[in-house]
Image: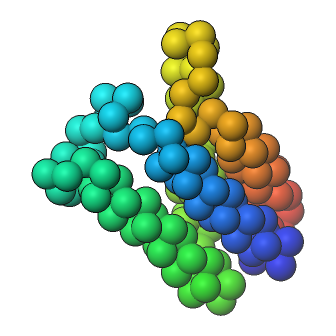
Amino acid sequence: MKKSIQNAFLVLVLIQCMHSIEEYLGQLWEVFPPATFLCGLVSKNLETGFFIINIGLFVVGLLCWQFPVRNNYPIAKAIVWFWIILELSNSIIHTLWTLSEGSYTPGIITAPFLFVAASYLAVQMKRPNA
């Protein structure tokens, strides 16, 4: 896997971290029913559940970058595509939610950055000899 893809993947994980921070500051678990549900599966305290899920996501992202992606494990391409789909979906859902609300929703400021980073990574992955 090319170094440019490895770097773009790390940037995507770091943007997801910033996105999680924005969602945390906006208390996403209190205003977005899917987040409320997921956080409740992890902890009775929704804020704690949110924190655990998002720290876990960040750690998994860093581990994916550190081992399979940087070391070109056979599963690396599948992992990168999983993250591309995850973050494209995440950014699109945030955009649609914000449009339906007609006002700020937690995560919408960083959602476009996720979209751009995931799209860039997808384009890089489609190139020959990715």
At x 38%, y 30%, the residue is: 32
Q: Can residue 51 be seen in this view?
A: yes
At x 43%, y 60%, the residue is: 54
Q: Quadrant of the N terminus?
A: bottom right
Q: In which quarter of the image is the C terminus?
A: bottom right
Looking at the picture, tell me which residue is in the foreground, 105 or 94.
105
The x and y percentages for residue 92 are: 60, 30
Looking at the picture, tell me which residue is in the foreground, 28 or 2.
28
In-image side of 82 versus 52 (left or right): right
Q: Is residue 91 visible?
A: no
The x and y percentages for residue 39 are: 27, 48
The x and y percentages for residue 78 are: 55, 64
Looking at the picture, tell me which residue is in the foreground, 89 or 126.
89
In-image side of 105 versus 35 (left or right): right
The picture quadrant where one finds residue 7 is: bottom right
Looking at the picture, tell me which residue is in the foreground, 78 or 118.
118
Give the total of numbered labels.
0
In-image side of 59 versus 122 (left or right): left
Position above or below: 2 against 32: below
At x 51%, y 47%, the residue is: 25
**Which residue is situated farthest in the left direction here?**
44
Position above or below: 105 against 82: above
At x 68%, y 84%, the residue is: 70
The picture quadrant where one finds residue 69 is: bottom right
In-image side of 10 versus 100 (left or right): right
The x and y percentages for residue 98 are: 58, 20
